[in-house]
Image (tube, coloured by chain):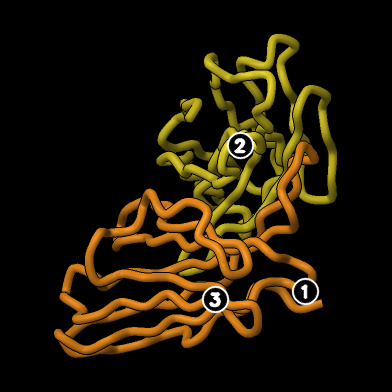
Chain colours: A yellow, B orange
């Protein structure tokens, strides 16, 4: 499985934008980039995913580099409820299609 | 539009007993995944099933653990003769059929197993 690299932790103040980076230099052409987050004592929550183009939804935006070797999850205005561990995952739907979780980035949001 | 439903949410078992964790996938989903999260650790893939078939069990311990997803009813993760090291959160997830659409996998809220 292709690997991703994320910072262990990041901090933000409430109502500020947050840019969570992810490196995936060994990404293959059939790998989708998925982001999930996990709040304390809860199951992982789907955030967003993309293949080549930038994506926006109500939760976040995903900016994908032109060479696809890195991506950035953007939370436009962080809230206290966004404090969680964020996982960047490559998912090859031509393989067994499972998600392999790394250690993720623990985001702290300060009031 | 119910999400992935897991029960029980919390389960306490004595060493040597059996634990059965149930997962009902989202409506229309025919693929189920089980993950385990030990205290203060990351999520580890255990098994991937489709209706009546195990597709990938590369993360399942070789002994005491089994999983099924029958034609009717929920998926079951069964742990026989539980030991204290089995204490963890077990998450189920589901998705529609695979393909090149990058379809989304949705997770349940988890079942917390405590072995005393």
Specify few, some or many for label 2: CA neighbours under 10 Å numbering under 14, 14-19, or 20 or more. Answer: many
Q: Residues within 10 Å of mark 3 (few under 14, many from 20)?
A: many
Q: Residue at x 75, y 26 (%)?
A: A63
Q: CA distance from mark 1 to mark 2?
A: 23 Å
Q: Residue at x 84, y 50 (%)?
A: A58
Q: Is residue B49 above or below residue B27?
A: above
Q: Chain of mark 2?
A: A
Front position in the image: A71 or B6: B6
- To the question of a shared chain for discs 3 and 1, the answer is yes
Proximity of marks 3 and 1: CB atoms separated by less than 8 Å: no
| Residue that badge 1 annotates | B27
Residue at the spot x=48%, y=67% of the render? Answer: B91
Task: Give how far apart the Cα atoms at labels 2 and 3 are.
Answer: 23 Å
In front: label 3 or label 1: 3
Q: Could you tell me if the residues under marks 2 and 3 are in contact, i.e. CB atoms within 8 Å?
A: no
Circle 1 sits in a helix, a strand or a loop, which is it? loop
Q: What percent of the width, then of the height, locates residue B5?
A: 62, 79
Within 10 angstroms of label 1, few (less than 14), some, or many (20 or more) residues? few
**Residue beneath label 3, please?**
B75
- Kind of element beneath mark 2: strand
| Quarter location, residue B62 | bottom left
Q: Which mark is residue A1?
A: none
Residues flagged by tags 1 and 2 on a common chain: no
Nearer the camera: disc 2 or disc 3:
3
Residue B108, image x and y in percent?
58, 70
Question: Where is mark 2, residue-wise?
Answer: A91
């Amino acid at each position: 499985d292709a690997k991703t690299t994320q910072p262990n932790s990041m901090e933000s103040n409430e109502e500020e934008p947050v840019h969570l980076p992810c490196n995936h230099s060994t990404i293959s052409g059939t790998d989708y980039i998925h982001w999930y987050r996990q709040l304390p004592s809860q199951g992982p929550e789907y955030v967003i995913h993309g293949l080549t183009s930038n994506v926006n939804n109500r939760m976040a935006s995903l900016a994908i580099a032109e060479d696809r070797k890195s991506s950035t999850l953007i939370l436009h205005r962080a809230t206290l409820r966004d404090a969680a561990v964020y996982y960047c995952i490559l998912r090859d739907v031509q393989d067994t299609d499972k998600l392999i979780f790394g250690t993720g980035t623990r985001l702290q949001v300060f009031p | 539009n119910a999400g992935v439903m897991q029960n029980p949410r919390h389960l306490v078992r004595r060493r040597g007993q059996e634990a059965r964790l149930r997962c009902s996938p989202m409506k229309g989903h025919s693929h189920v995944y089980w993950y385990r999260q030990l205290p203060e650790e990351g999520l580890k893939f255990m098994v991937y099933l489709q209706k009546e078939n195990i597709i990938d069990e590369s993360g399942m311990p070789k002994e005491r653990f089994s999983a099924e997803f029958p034609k009717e009813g929920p998926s079951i993760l069964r742990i026989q003769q539980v030991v204290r090291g089995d204490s963890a959160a077990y998450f189920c997830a589901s998705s529609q059929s695979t393909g090149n659409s990058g379809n989304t996998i949705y997770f349940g809220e988890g079942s917390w197993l405590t072995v005393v």
